[in-house]
Amino acid sequence: MRILVVGTAGNVGKAALAELKPRHEVITAGRSSGDVRVDLLDASSISAMYEKLGKLDAVVACAGHAHYGPLASMTETQFMVGLKDKLMGQVNLVLLGTPYINDRGSFTLTSGMVDRDPVVKAANAATVNAALKGFVTSAAIELERGIRINVVSPGVLEESAKKYEGLFPGHEAVSSARVGLAYAKSVEGALTGQVIIVG
């Protein structure tokens, strides 16, 4: 398969890439690294990327940021970070990318565990993750030509645990290998409209 993976600079993207690259033609994309550049905050940048790449069998999105901070002091501007970046960036990859996906191809988005297992300072991330679930389950019944869509929802990766130290008390970190397998399950399997939980 010809697969586009967006966001391979982070640990989740690296996990997806490590699992898929040995078996497929993988093209990487990111804001500052990858085979092609794309800014998920700019719909015209996403469109230009698709026009450059042409037809694809799958798109895997592992990019996007959310704001982590106390709810009591959170501003609208801070809250919009996750909505514009992690949510709409991934949604636009689907909206603008559907014409470029081959019949029976797929989209795989990325959320996270805080919408189902909340922690302090993660209200923005939890909202975005829940919205991604809603988008995927709804889009799955409308996508045509047999195109599938799922979202992978990993816990904190072992490689990222130190970065988030203290933010996820009592949570067991998950391995990159397990996270990578979740992307393979979505891309190579037959599921659609599903949240694939790792953790």
Image: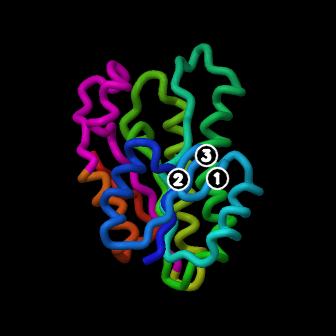
Q: Compute the Cα span from label 2 to label 1.
A: 9 Å
Tell me if label 3 and label 1 are in contact, CB under 8 Å.
yes
Question: Residue 73 at x, y = what percent?
Answer: 61, 14
Residue at image mark 3: 31
Question: Residue 125 at x, y = what percent?
Answer: 51, 36
Name the element at disc 3: loop
Which residue shows up at 31% across the image and 56% down it?
Answer: 180
Tell me the number on the disc at residue 38: 1
Tell me if label 2 and label 1 are in contact, CB under 8 Å.
yes
Q: Compute the Cα span from label 2 to label 3.
A: 8 Å
Q: How many C-alpha atoms fall within 10 Å of the one at disc 2: few (<14), some, or many (≥20)? A: some
Question: Residue 97 at x, y = what percent?
Answer: 64, 68
Tell me the number on the disc at residue 34: 2
Which residue shows up at 62% across the image and 53% down it?
Answer: 37
Which mark's residue is nearer the viewer, 2 or 3?
A: 2
Question: Residue 42 at x, y = what percent?
Answer: 73, 49
Front position in the image: 38 or 121 = 38
Magenta segment boundaries in residue numbering: 147-176
